[in-house]
Image (cartoon, rainbow, N blue to C red):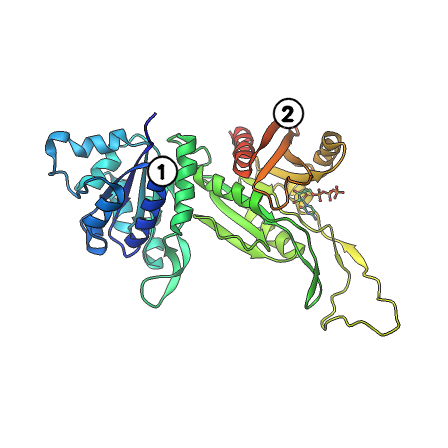
Amino acid sequence: MGKPKVVLGVSGGIAAYKACELLRRLTESGHDVRVVPTASALRFVGAATWSALSGHPVSTEVWSDVHEVPHVRIGQQADLVVVAPATADMLAKAAHGLADDLLTNTLLTARCPVVFAPAMHTEMWEHPATQENVATLRRRGAVVIEPAVGRLTGADSGKGRLPEPGEIFEVCRRVLARGVTAPDLAGRHVVVSAGGTREPLDPVRFLGNRSSGKQGYALARTAAARGARVTLVAANTGLPDPAGVDVVPVGTAAQLREAVVEAAADADAVVMAAAVADFRPETYATGKIKKKEGADPDPVVLVRNPDVLAEISAGRPRPGQVVVGFAAETDDVLANGRAKLRRKGCDLLVVNEVGERKTFGSEQNEAVVLGADGSETSVPFGPKEALAETVWDLVAERLA
Ligand code: CTP
């Protein structure tokens, strides 16, 4: 089998320079990349750069090498088309099927998955014209990555930044691996919680846990690549924001609850991958707790935290919403898992056996996904993304 063929479309925005890094990542990981810039993209980064980095000739219009019918061939032969950056103008052309240069022709002839990574000023992104074009493209099956929030060209900042090239690369890799043109979570809103909550004792101390957040981030990334709008409620993870995902940072279980409940109001699925502290210290000392000479330390009195998973499962703010919980067990894994599934009232429970190499902080995981309908799906030891894909397969089945 030859290398997967990727078309990298580049439209005319200052973020075009970041596409060089995306191109490098794609070629270094074994993809055959054909760069198709627009004429305005070449005002930012020249044809020589694209040609040297991709190892292919570069042209912007349909009149070069006409005997090879490039305006049809490039799109037809592609396994993936990714447009980064996609300007407001490019999204509009793509949504309306205009074909006045090589890139827009390629978009019309491509029958493979298409990913757009928009970058523009906040006003342009939020304009109803752009939002309707994005909705049209998503409805037709394209993956449109939400822009990142941050510094824009000039002094202003807001939503509209091109996500980091490494993050766009991850979306491309996931979309290519699935190889389908109609993302099964398109038009869905999913909420994922990740990380571990911290319950403060005083200004410098907290009760916490060892959850890294990697499983929740893998869930968020894979859902975005399958076309979902993703809200990631992230408790103390320190991981980079996945591309196209709305990240809501939280600290404590109470903050996590508030963020999850708010986002769940219009969500099709809620996946609670976070390790939420079951207890918090009853009192918070506003000053640092000091040791007293010759005296025993004061005991720490704990009180129960709300159970977010049980609350969402019981409330189901949206009819047909699919709720997924996680459980880490050391013994009687399946029996404890079944009992927990019933107690929490969720549709699916991902049961991990906690061990030395597994689960906490590791890149790999192994689990059984139990369904309230009695189903049992084993996921062999492997990358956390594989487990995430299985979870979304099961969620998508239930949503359909
Ligand atoms: N969870 C939650 N709110 C809590 C505690 C846990 O939403 N206050 C969610 C977690 O995100 C996870 C699931 O519940 O999806 C499993 O939590 P776990 O702590 O294993 O369940 P417990 O009922 O606390 O069971 P155990 O007695 O084994 O700790």
Q: Is residue 60 visible?
A: yes
| 158 lies left or right of 341 | left
**Residue holding disc 1:** 142
Q: What type is the residue that disc 2 sits on?
A: Ser
Image mark for residue 100: none
* Local crowd size for mark 1, using a 10 Å CA cut-off: few (<14), some (14–19), many (≥20): many
Image mark for residue 375: 2
Query: Residue at 63% across / 48% down in the picture?
Result: 211
In the rendered structure, are the residues bearing label 1 and label 2 in contact, judged by CB atoms less than 8 Å apart?
A: no
Asked whether 225 or 94 is in front, the reply is 225
Q: Quadrant of residue 93?
A: top left
Asked whether 190 or 202 is in front, the reply is 202
Quadrant assignment for ligand 1: top right
| 49 lies left or right of 281 | left
* Local crowd size for mark 2, using a 10 Å CA cut-off: few (<14), some (14–19), many (≥20): few
Q: Secondary structure at mark 1?
A: loop
Q: Quadrant of residue 287?
A: bottom right
| For residue 365, above or below residue 10 | above
